[in-house]
């Protein structure tokens, strides 16, 4: 849906209709949020089944190790899936900048949200606060949310509408 939004932005700006571009982006964002929201709920509910599908215990001596891995996988899937709605919004808004011909804005957003925020936050939460892997999962989810907020602010600012496509 984010690629479709980017295409609509390019077409609409090329036709001199920035309002149509903006409507297309918000429409795609809502549908993407609904879609990933439903997937997030399914991942939350069926996390044990999904993760267990990838874990097999052929060796009874390793059953406890596999159970530990499944436990961490379920926790990860549940925590990360809570950020899917925000990530869905951020994906569509980021791609809309690309559709407008603005490739630097999404680059800066990703550098900020993932490299400068998520990685240090994961290290601080995991090691500094002793949360272990849970800290990494929380940092991922928070950075998804930050991506959506930063993208929304920059999208609403509207400078992308001034791009010549």
Image (spheres, rainbow, N blue to C red):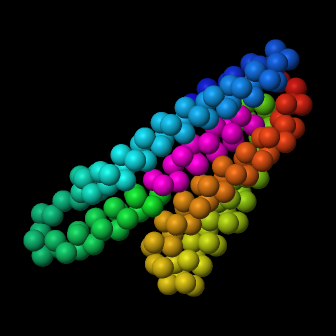
Question: Can I make out residue 43 in this image?
Answer: yes
Q: Residue at x 62, y 72 (%)?
A: 121
Looking at this view, name the residue that lies furthest to the left: 60
Q: Nearer the viewer, residue 142 or 9?
A: 142
Q: Residue at x 43, y 47 (%)?
A: 40
User: What x and y, as percent, mark residue 106?
Assistant: 73, 46
Q: Main secondary structure of the magenta part?
A: helix
User: What x and y, as percent, mark residue 109?
Assistant: 73, 52
User: What x and y, as percent, mark residue 33?
Assistant: 54, 39
Question: Can I make out residue 9 in this image?
Answer: no
Range drawn in magenta? 81-97
Please tell me whether residue 83 is drawn above or below residue 97 in the rendered image. below
Is 54 left, or right, of 81 in this rendering?
left
Q: Residue at x 69, y 39 (%)?
A: 93
User: What x and y, as percent, mark residue 47?
Assistant: 32, 55
Q: Residue at x 55, y 84 (%)?
A: 129
Please tell me whether residue 33 is drawn above or below residue 8 in the rendered image. below
């Amino acid at each position: 849906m984010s690629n479709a939004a980017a295409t609509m932005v390019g077409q609409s700006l090329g036709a001199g209709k920035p309002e149509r571009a903006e409507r297309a982006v918000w429409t795609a964002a809502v549908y993407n949020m609904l879609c990933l929201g439903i997937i997030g709920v399914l991942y939350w509910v069926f996390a044990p089944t999904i993760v267990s599908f990838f874990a097999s215990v052929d060796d009874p001596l390793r059953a406890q190790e596999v159970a530990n891995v499944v436990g961490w996988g379920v926790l990860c899937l549940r925590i990360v899936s809570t950020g899917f709605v925000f990530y869905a919004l951020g994906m569509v808004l980021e791609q809309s900048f690309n559709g407008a011909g603005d490739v630097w804005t999404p680059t800066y957003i990703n550098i900020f949200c993932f490299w400068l925020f998520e990685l240090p936050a994961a290290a601080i939460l995991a090691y500094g606060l002793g949360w272990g892997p849970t800290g990494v999962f929380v940092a991922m989810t928070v950075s998804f949310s930050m991506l959506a907020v930063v993208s929304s602010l920059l999208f609403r600012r509207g400078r992308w509408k001034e791009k010549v496509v």
